[in-house]
Image: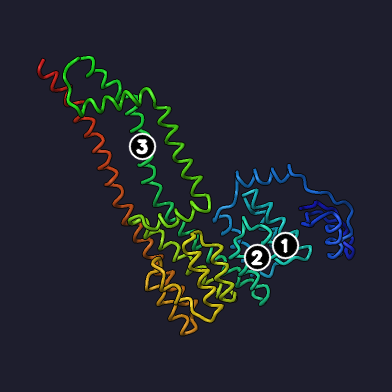
Amino acid sequence: MRFIFKARDKNTGEVRMGKVDAFDEKAATEALGENNLIPLSISRERNFSRFLRELQKSWEGRNKKDLMIFFRQLSILIGASVPVVQSLRAVADQSENKFMRSIVKEIADDVEEGASLSESMAKHPDVFPNLSTSIIKAGEISGGLKDSLDYVLKNTEKNYRLTSKIKGALVYPGFILGATLIIGFIVVTVILPKITKMVTDLEIDIPWHTKAVIAVGDFMAAYWWAVLMVIFGIIGGFIYYIKTETGKKEWDQIKMKIPVVGKLFRYIYLSRFASNFSALLVGGIPIVKALNIMSEVIDNSVYRSIILRSADEMRSGGNISNVFSKSPYVPGIVSKMIKIGEETGKMDESLKSISDFYDEEIENITRNFFSLLEPVLIVILGLGVAVMVFAIILPIYSIVGEM
């Protein structure tokens, strides 16, 4: 649990305020004493304040851009020989995200009380990935904190650019597809029943396909609310299922088998693995520990299993390339490049080459796929209009022509 304290520094006499994690109030008092602080008041943090923190987190949260800005500013300040605590407070003051600002201030307080930067960051795993804290911890041990921050910054920037590129490519086709579905729903629910009523009022023999369209329009006019409930229910059920452990494993496999899109997913995971794994090795993390960290940060159960098997293989004296070469989800070029890195002792360079290659492939796929998607959507719209004309408009014109 967390306690809010007010204490006096034994050395300077300065009064400090902050928070400390401890099992109970006695343990919190002992923790303050170990840091040369004389407790003046200690109180348990109220659940309401935690609720406000969670509310602020859900409202503002932390995105990759905030994290990138944090590491960039901190790296610049540390490189300019500004003390860590002062650097953290300066970064917090510059942050426009209130949630991120409060987290950085807490880290600054922890560092000022004697904790290391990596230990303080590790208290907030929902903000700072284990990947980043591990590299920074290695930098603190080796005395190369600035270099570690630079590695983390480059890695964060690369992930941010990759995510932004994919999201940017999805915006236009996503907007077109969403607008098409909404307009189609309105047409079938509101406009179609009014048009079909004109046909039914004529009391003439109409073709079967026109009857089918009329039936669809009448059903949507009467039960559009039920259709919406079913649609939202299916979407909600799908989202709930893929968040379960079993559902996530199945979805992780399914999405990599989808034509074109599946290849894009595989390339993204491989690029991130190579880039992040390289950053860990360059940062001085032992290879087995780096693999374990990668298994935690890679957001796919299929590749997580492959990475964990690789870690077990390394513990028993084997090679990563042996495991990778046996997986259908890892192209042969990846396992061969890793094998070259293992044989030459230049694993980080091999991984960087893999990352660069798949970054280029991702860019090509997204550009070609979404260029093709636009005309496909236009064809779908055209088919919808053609159905309307063929089933409704043409019969009306035929009837009018015979009158």
Up the image or down, 401 lies above or below 371; here it is above
Residue ID at (37%, 73%) = 332
Instruction: Give the mark nearest the N terminus, 3 or 2.
Output: 2
Residue ID at (62%, 50%) = 96
- In the image, taking residue 276 as reference, residue 104 lies left or right, namely right
Residue ID at (83%, 57%) = 28
Q: Which mark is residue 77?
A: 2
Pick the front one: 171 or 389:
389
Label 1 residue SS? helix
Q: Of circles 3 and 1, which is in front?
A: 3
Query: Which residue in the protein does label 1 denote?
Result: 86
Up the image or down, 60 lies above or below 11; here it is above
Label 2 residue SS? helix
Where residue 310 appears, as percent x and y from the top left, is 50, 73
Query: Which residue in the protein does label 3 denote?
Result: 181
- In the image, taking residue 119 as reference, residue 76 lies left or right, namely left
What distance separates the C-alpha of mark 3 from that of mark 1? 53 Å
Where residue 17 appears, as percent x and y from the top left, is 81, 54
Kind of residue at disc 2: Leu
Kind of residue at disc 1: Gln
What distance separates the C-alpha of mark 3 from that of mark 2? 50 Å
What distance separates the C-alpha of mark 1 from that of mark 2? 9 Å
- Name the outermost residue toward the left: 402
